[in-house]
Amino acid sequence: MALDIVFTNGTFHTQDPDRPVAHSVGVHQGKVVSLDDELSPELFARTVDLKGATVVPGFHDAHCHLSFLGESLVQLDLRPAAVTTMGELIAAVRDAAQQAEPGEWIMGQGYDQNYLDGEHPTAEALDSAAPENPVWLWHNSRHMAVANTKAFELAGYPQRKGFTVPEGGDVPLDDDGAARGLLQETARSIVSGVLPAKTTAGVADQIAAASDAAVAAGITSITEPGLGDPSNIGQCPTDLAAYQLAKDQGRLHVRATVMPYMTTLHPVDPTGDTVAEDFPGEDQSFGLDLGIRSGMGDDWLRIGAVKVLSDGSLIGRSAFMTEGYAADAEQGVENVGYLQFPQEWLERRLIAAHANGWQLAAHAIGDGAVDVVLDIFEKAQEQYPREDTRHRIEHFGVASDEQVARAARLGVVPVSQGRFVNELGDGMAKALGEKRTRLCYRMKSLVDAGLVAPASTDAPVVEYPPLSNIHDMVNRRTASGAQFVPEECVSVDEAVHAYTVASAYASHQEDVKGSLTPGKLADFVVLSEDIYSVDPTTIKDIEVTATVIGGEIMHGNL
């Protein structure tokens, strides 16, 4: 019986240190079976000539909100690339309202106040643009949103008054005590509960649309951090079913590792005697129903770590810091941000999840939050020792030398986003001030400390194409052209390794993907130019000419 397919006449940068470069790759049943002349081309049913092209393993975005990326493709685009002034943003809302039926929700996302003279849209301004429609606009961080008066009314708060601000959130008020429109962090729940409900089929459509866009950009697998709790992170309570539906329909075109949000975990007791406040140890169960936990699934769809937010965002100045934000200090305000949940709440649940075999993934951007999370991870391991946990800190946004060293000692995986430097860097630098910016979104320091540091984008917070992200990891310049801590630049080889081997490692999958090694998945990307030899300032201009997943050409013509 013939083997499936052999790709010849290419320069494959395999990311396998034992054989870093090959010129042909043989594939059978979705996996690499040979390199170069290990097997004769005559043994394969099909031969594809790559005509000398450069090939790298498929890019794995270690922190990508794929379902939200799909949502962003159909909602009002308010990113800085689309609207550059507050007037343009309000005009976009007005145009959408004129095309909508009275009472129909106007939904948009991606605005960044740092591109709008530091101002957020107000409810009154949105009312003037859409007097007959409720409006909800996501900030690009997705840690905050803006709602208009009709949206507040639907939530039961006429005149934008009468609500209670939940712990871990904030709502700026006008002089008369009415909400100005901005809902920060957990305060989003004041209105988010009345947003149009998502269906399993609708979320599956979003996943399918986003996976097609991802494949065209060279992404062969993603990790989506946080499913199942729309009041925190997630589209709907059946997010996992939506992924399964997309897969069953043959529309999930990227491999997906998905993280349930922490609030979806609960004590699991078949006798029904466990009360909600009990958090069992390793002899019982704290997880999803039937004791499901990290690792269940296959090469296309599997359950990864459990995700929780510990703090907020830098550009929203809600990330929990050990020192106040410089931008607020200039206004005479001492602001260190805040935790999303009380530390005791985080500790109890994270330790229970660790004790029951979960990989942990805690969002921590501020250095204050990093301290809190590292303390919990260390305590969890002391109480319930486990091998090779690979607990993750998502973002690891501001971290001192001591925190980097401690993370390395604990075997923590820091999941940062190089693209933030370009799209958010000017705003982050303004928020932090010069001294603290030196500690922001470090990359070279992580690698030099021996940490396994994967690559990710947090899309749709910023753009998702891996080559743009690699460009920013290597060059580290903001949208204004300013250098952003250039000593943290990494090499092209380090950036590609982060997007392949390190990202696979972050989800305990380095044995099946990340490098083009016999026995591993045949996922790879064909590039228009050699990423290792072009001028580094032109990396973003390289095109993905083909994406191959499991030996199947999913994008491009070969």
Image (cartoon, grey):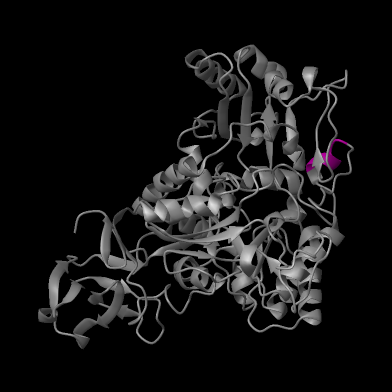
In the depicted structure, whether residue 281 falls above or below residue 175: below
In the depicted structure, whether residue 45 falls above or below residue 367: below
Which image quarter holds the C terminus? bottom left
In the depicted structure, whether residue 207 falls above or below residue 32: above
Residue in the foreground of this view, choosing between 239 and 181: 239
Which image quarter holds the N terminus? bottom left
**Which residue sits at x=75%, y=66%?**
350
Q: Quadrant of residue 119?
A: top right
Name the spot of residue 233 as percent of width and height, x first: 64, 48
Q: Which residues are magenta?
A: 327-331
Q: Quadrant of residue 546?
A: bottom left
**Which residue sits at x=51%, y=15%?**
101
Name the spot of residue 415 as percent of width and height, x first: 60, 63
Name the spot of residue 14 as percent of width and height, x first: 35, 76
Name the spot of residue 172 as percent of width and height, x first: 81, 30
Residue in the foreground of this view, choosing between 195 and 107: 195
Q: Is residue 6 magenta?
A: no
Secondary structure predominantly adopted by residues drawn in magenta: helix
Report whether residue 528 is seen.
Answer: no
Residue in the foreground of this view, choosing between 179 and 420: 179
Report whether residue 385 is seen.
Answer: yes
Is 32 situated left or right of 269 in this image? left
Total numbered badges shown on the rendered structure: 0
